[in-house]
Image (spheres, rainbow, N blue to C red):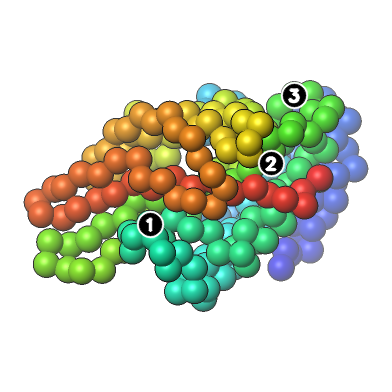
Amino acid sequence: MNTPKLDKLLKEWRTHQHRGPEALQKLEERVTRALASERYLGAVSPHSATDGAPVHARWIWAWAVGVCALALVSGLVVRSHIGRTLPAAATWAMVAPAELATQRVLFEESESLFAQHLKWIVQSGNSVHLEIQPEPASVREPAGPMMIRFVVVRKMASGKKWENVWQTDVLVRGQEWVQFRVGPGPKDEIRLWFHQNSDGTYVMESGLALTAPVRLAAESEAILRVGQPREITRTRTAGVEYRLYQTLEALKGCG
């Protein structure tokens, strides 16, 4: 729950979006300072992840982290009931129905808040980031909104069970080109673009570079079906096997 001080700032944002960029930036700084006293500070990013430019109303991420935590719990509860015909490693890339519903809420609320300026949301590790566009989108693209999940799973040399060691979820309103830094290295990033085919499948072009928790680099262009994880690459380091999976889900009911 937000503090009265933060609630006041949020209301000020909603009622003063017509202000010039300098005034909005000052308001953003006040919101960020208010969030400094909140326990979700680690999820607040007052700057764009792509070019360092300010992105207004980053306060939404304090709320978003709670949503993402709920999504994680929902996924753990029902994971054992999905993907029984998939390889054990691939089930970690599945999106449970309850989790997908939570992601829909996150996208809908964010899009409503930013008055159709929202392009995409990236949830990586403990952080949540957005990209907004100067002009509002006039219409919703047929191919969106969508959720794309990237998961790295690991199996120890002497073990039999797979575990999730890295995950990033991208919520995108349509056929947007997404490029986002996702790791500590200067070149750690995700790149993706997709297009819907007439048969309901999707052409997905993506690239991923990671230095942690394992060094991975992969480029992929493939036909994906909604809800069906696809292995992009695998590697083995010191006897430990790592696999990278990708899953596409439709955020139906948005907009």
Identify the mark at residue 144; answer none if there is no mark: none
For disc 3, the marked residue is 134
Q: Residue furthest left?
A: 238
Q: Residue at x 43, y 29 (%)?
A: 221
On the question of residue 110 being in view, the answer is yes
Say what secondary structure mark 1 lies in.
Answer: helix
Q: Earlier in the sequence, mark 3 or mark 2?
A: 3
Q: Earlier in the sequence, mark 1 or mark 2?
A: 1
How far apart in space, not on screen, are marks 3 and 2 (Cα)?
Answer: 19 Å
Q: Position of residue 79 (x, y in %)?
A: 48, 70
Circles 1 and 2: CB atoms closer than 8 Å: no
Q: Mark 3: few, some, or many residues within 10 Å (few <14, many ≥20)?
A: few
For disc 1, the marked residue is 90
Q: Position of residue 191 (x, y in %)?
A: 46, 30
Q: Position of residue 17 (x, y in %)?
A: 85, 35
Q: Amino acid at mark 3?
A: Pro
